[in-house]
Image (cartoon, rainbow, N blue to C red):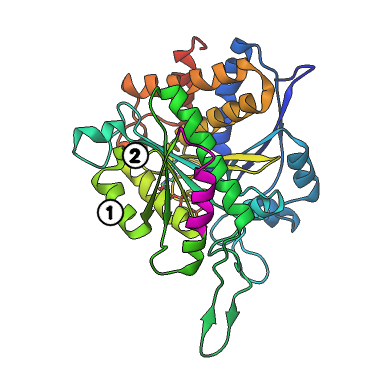
Amino acid sequence: MTGSNAVRIAVLPGDGIGTEVTEATLAVLEPLAKRHGIGLATEVLPAGAFHYQATGDAFPEASFRAAEAADAILLGAMGWPGIRYADGTEIAPQLDLRFRLNLYAGVRPVRAIPGVPVALADPRARDIDLVILRESTEGLFFSRGRGLVTEEMAEETLRITRAVTEKLARFAFRMAERRARQRGRRGCVTLVDKANVFRAFAFMRSVFDGVAREFPGVAAAHHYVDAMALDLVRKPWAFDVLPTENMFGDILSDLGAGLVGGMGFSPSADIGDRHALFQPAHGTAPDIAGRGIANPTATLLSAAMMLDWLAARGAGQGFADAAGELEAAVDAAFAGGLRTADIGGRDGTAAVARAVAAKFGAS
Ligand code: ATP
Ligand code: MG
């Protein structure tokens, strides 16, 4: 997959099913790129728990540099039970990537895929199509690893800054505008907070309201996080774009994944001003790794988000078309009866890749 003016994709397969779902995704991207005449130069880079076990380095500086220099990063998953740093902490170098590349916006779409069982019996659940926007650099994760711990107490910091909140809010409103254009309806951005109890969230709300005034064409609302947990189960079809604090977003996006078929169907992106990382929301799934049954759909949908992001960054209409066709092909494959093991079926990782590629005429 190389070309003279190719867009460069750094691929970090990682560990466990991370390697399996990225391999399946690359197998779909290749014919898709060819079909749309887009140049994708992929470079597979070593990192992860097994790389640490073999070399003592979980994320070689050369891999980091290559990822930093690429136009976009596609990641599988990293980490493995039993492989830990010398100090006993978990190997999760993808989190460092988030901080080092300042990827402040965690994009977690929650969308019902035709044919994939949803968790709610209400027929409107088939219309679930929302995005949780998780702030990924501050909030309750600000003191991650630096909290104060004594014999008698432990303390972590909740930090909300104006600069990051403004960026996240603008990102949310622009995304709502883009989605509204694609879907032919008015967009709505709902900030999820706890402004009734924490001054930090009252501050977040006031900064959000300031940005909302720049986007009169998009509806703006607020929701307390506890009420949102309830409403995401009661009427998830009523929501559009949901920006929120780091920890709230972490929790609500797993709830969202549970609504629409589970982790195997949940893509994600971590986006900054200059860099962007695309990966499935799930981990390395040691229980099913190596058996060829991992569901690559989340990674395929993440790759579609990547092509769409590249298009929005000026890579060209071919990228937008390819993104749309990839998502439509996933939908068509499942609507046509594809059933992965995580939803009680028998179709394995490679079968999903074949079925999706077949929908756009590759074999
Ligand atoms: P992490 O710590 O990285 O978040 P985790 O311990 O939460 O990982 P995951 O790997 O995300 O665990 O997944 C939990 C379980 O869900 C897995 O053990 C596996 O059974 C199932 N699962 C996750 N992803 C997939 C997938 N793509 N296909 C099939 N099953 C999956
Ligand atoms: Mg998890």
- Give amino acid for label 1: Leu
Q: Nearer the viewer, residue 194 or 270?
A: 194
- Give amino acid for label 2: Gly
Asked if residue 332 is positioned above or below residue 309 in the image, the reply reads: above
Residue 180 location, quadrant: top left
Residue under the image location 79 percent in, 50 percent down: 61
Q: Local crowd at mark 1 within 10 Å, few (<14), some, or many (≥20)?
A: few
Q: Which mark is residue 74?
A: none
Residue segment shown in magenta: 204-217
Q: Nearer the viewer, residue 271 or 280?
A: 271
Q: CA distance from mark 1 to mark 2?
A: 19 Å
Q: Which residue is mark 2?
A: 261
Query: Which quarter of the rendering shows the N terminus?
Result: top right
Residue under the image location 59 percent in, 62 percent down: 90
Q: Is 214 one of the magenta-colored residues?
A: yes
Observer-side mark, 1 or 2, equals 1
Residue under the image location 37 percent in, 57 percent down: 225
Q: Which residue is mark 1?
A: 230
Q: Total marks drawn?
A: 2
Residue under the image location 38 percent in, 26 percent down: 185
Left or right relative to 306: residue 222: left
Residue 320, visible in the rendered structure? yes
Q: Is 335 one of the magenta-colored residues?
A: no
